[in-house]
Image (tube, helix red, strand yellow):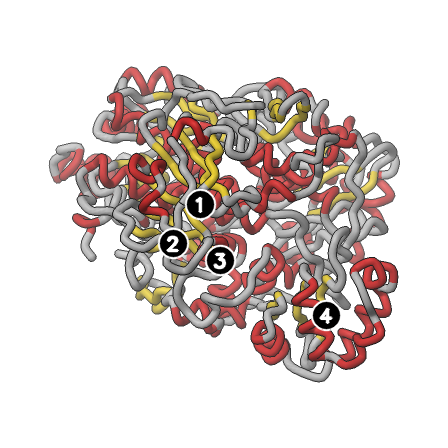
Amino acid sequence: MNSASLPLTGIRIVDLTMGWAGPLATRNLADLGAEVIKVESCKRFDWWRSWEATPEWVADNGAEKSPQYLSVNRNKLDITLDLEHPKGRELLLKLVTTANALVENYSGSVLPKLGLDYPSLVNANPDLVMVSMPAFGSTGPWSEFRAYGSTVEHSSGLPHLVGDPQQPPTMQHVAFGDAVGGLNGTAAILTALWHQKQTGAGQFVDLSQVECLFPLAAQGVLQQSVTVEAPQRTGNAHPEFAPYGVYPCSGDDAWIVIEVTSEDQWQALQRLIPGLADFSDLTDRMQRRKNLDTMIAQWTLEQSADAAMQTLQARGVIAAKLNNGHDLLHEPQLRDRGYLQWLERDHVGLQPNASAPFRTGAGPIPIRHPAPTLGQDNDYVLTEILGLSAKELSALENQEIIGTKPRLPD
Amino acid sequence: MAQSNPVSGVFQDLTIVDVSGSVATSYAAKLFADYGALAVNLEPPGGFPTRRLKPLLSGGESAMHGYLHTNKQSVIGSKTHLKDEPVTVNADLVIYDPSHLPRQDYLADIDRNTCAISWYGLTGPYASMQGSDATVHALSGLMRGIGTPEGPPIIPPGYQAQIIGGLSAFNGALGHLLATKLGNLSSAFQLDASILEANMCFTDLAAINAYNNNPLPPRMGINRFPPTYPLGIWPCKDGWLGVTTLTPSQWKAFCKLLDMEHFADVELFQSSVSRLESSDLLEPEILQALSQHSAEDLFYRGQAMRIPLARVPTMEELFSVDQYSSRNAFSQVTIGDDAFHAPSTPFRLFATPPHFGGPVADLGADNYRWSVTHE
């Protein structure tokens, strides 16, 4: 498939985002065929390339080797512009006049200080969609507070629903808020683009990454609101079902999740594990949950997680092995669907790339090209789109407004 | 009897029909409804599965159903095949879960855009396997990293996998609907959205790192994850504080905040990974220092020093956090005479805002609009 047949062909996005959430939001648009132009600078490159850059890292082309950076920037173009220089800002505004949307996740004060806030941008392009993705939203007393994906999870209330009550409120991931914010960012941009296509009008879109996590905590939020009682953490013990839990399997750190949510499933499990004959209805199973779990664990410990999953699923019981990163590379379902696409990339060689999580054909939406190197598309964007001459380009390089290598502060 | 009202907004020209009523299909349709689409639930006579999800209101209605179905219509399906349902004639998009269809050939001969949201995708060896939010968290690798080293890993609660799956399917469906508007697509599309693949957004890097011989370590403990430290949720004098320090400057500022400046310039601790490797040495000092302060005080002072600290509100506290209340982060849902608060749409278009809360249609409340007759 070439880009001419992709859903968002003809849409241009100026991408000022860095890290994980913002670049994921725009990557999803690039996967759908939008022309996403990522704007970095040699001095202020995407910190997702490294948050501890050193001269050795620069010399070793470390900026081009970060797996996390590569994974969220494929299918994009990349240019460098020093936005602290008037000429850099002038070129950005010129680029904005050609775009449908601009997306940013700087902390609140950065763009206004550069003269690149929404009023300035919309002055350059009155039909522009601008999507801002700060952690707490662009209004309210915390609008300029700093956060990472972990801070977003901390602030969402979700940790008070996870894990055992004897443990501290429990996180689920090192940067849980980033991925969720990214998906919501995509939704926000697409919704505004729909409106722009319908009416011709752009607008400002505000996304709070913390608020993006509230739907994931909905059950707790609703229980608090409806019953005025705080939801209790119950670890892996489900309040309505038994058996329900994570059970050890043969092998090192091997586990399977099993849940029984109907009597049919329970009877199938009873037929499979003779020791369960002693247990009866749901009430009995809930009351003797610990004994029940012990019996099931005796059975699961005798086999691999994969074999146990296949055996249980063949009998209609909900079950799945717990994968780790290495397992994902070989996971049969993902392999069969071609979920990991393999692309050659300068500096790192052949690399796996996760596909978009939806498709309309037999295979995944093809990934057209890997993540660009720093400033890889300066020539194309500045000459073909903005109409600069080779001489002007050379002058920009001499003034260090553009470039292709990171520069650390003196 | 409560009836939904026609609404207006960004998607006011779109009609979305949900024929399954799983949490995932409901959430995908909800995002369209929040921005003004005419969203119709085509329900079986017993109602969608979401009508039975807890928590329940005093009258027995499901609050979760209410949250997922504000500003939608409810019609009871009456035909053997979807193509014969009056509501389908106008549908721009039919959303379904293949494991929640009345019969296998229910969608036969339907010339409409469709969006299937299934646990593992419509193809592949797991396509017909039983699924749940927990199995998705297990297979995606998320669960493997949560909990103590000795295990068992912890199951993320609620319907998180389905919310992510529904959100991701919304993106795919809207992208393809927009393609039609842009002239990039001229025929009906059939979207295959996998909840498992959607949830790989948390863990695809784990696979990539494993391929590059840099696999994530096994579970390191509650709230302990690579590649940085201090990271976690710790007790203070009067509540919980969420801490993240990643860069050298944040580490120095954190040390200053907690009067631990003897650690600030130690060469070893300038690297996030080195601090993580030294966490057993650092943690007792950090816990001791935190216990001397209030979480609220540290949060505001830390943020002023550009350290990404967080209050960690309970569900009860969530409703009274200034930041969230000032933005109407929670809005009122009404079912009959009952009302409660639920999360608002997370993204806000300023010129064309979403609906904040709203009414929930009783089962079949909109039959009359669609001239429903039973076969």
Marks 4, 3 in one chain: no
Residue position marked by numbered label 1 in the rendering: B19
Crowding near the residue tagged with mark 1, few <14, some 14–19, many ≥20 C-alpha atoms within 10 Å: many
Q: CA distance from mark 4 to mark 3?
A: 26 Å
- Dot 3 or dot 1: first in sequence order is 1
Dot 2 falls on which chain? Answer: B
Callout 3: SS? helix
- Dot 1 or dot 2: first in sequence order is 1
Residue A21 visible: no
Report which quarter residue B145 is drawn in.
bottom right
Residue position marked by numbered label 3 in the rendering: B99
Crowding near the residue tagged with mark 4, few <14, some 14–19, many ≥20 C-alpha atoms within 10 Å: many
C-beta proximity under 8 Å, tags 1 and 4 = no
Q: Residue at x 11, y 36 (%)?
A: A389
Three-letter code, disc 2: Tyr
Crowding near the residue tagged with mark 3, few <14, some 14–19, many ≥20 C-alpha atoms within 10 Å: some
Q: CA distance from mark 1 to mark 4?
A: 35 Å
Residue position marked by numbered label 2 in the rendering: B106
Residue position marked by numbered label 4 in the rendering: A247
Marks 2, 3 in one chain: yes
Q: Residue at x 33, y 27 (%)?
A: A85
Marks 1, 4 in one chain: no
Q: CA distance from mark 3 to mark 1?
A: 11 Å
Dot 4 falls on which chain? Answer: A
Residue B118 visible: yes
- Dot 2 or dot 3: first in sequence order is 3
Q: CA distance from mark 2 to mark 3?
A: 12 Å
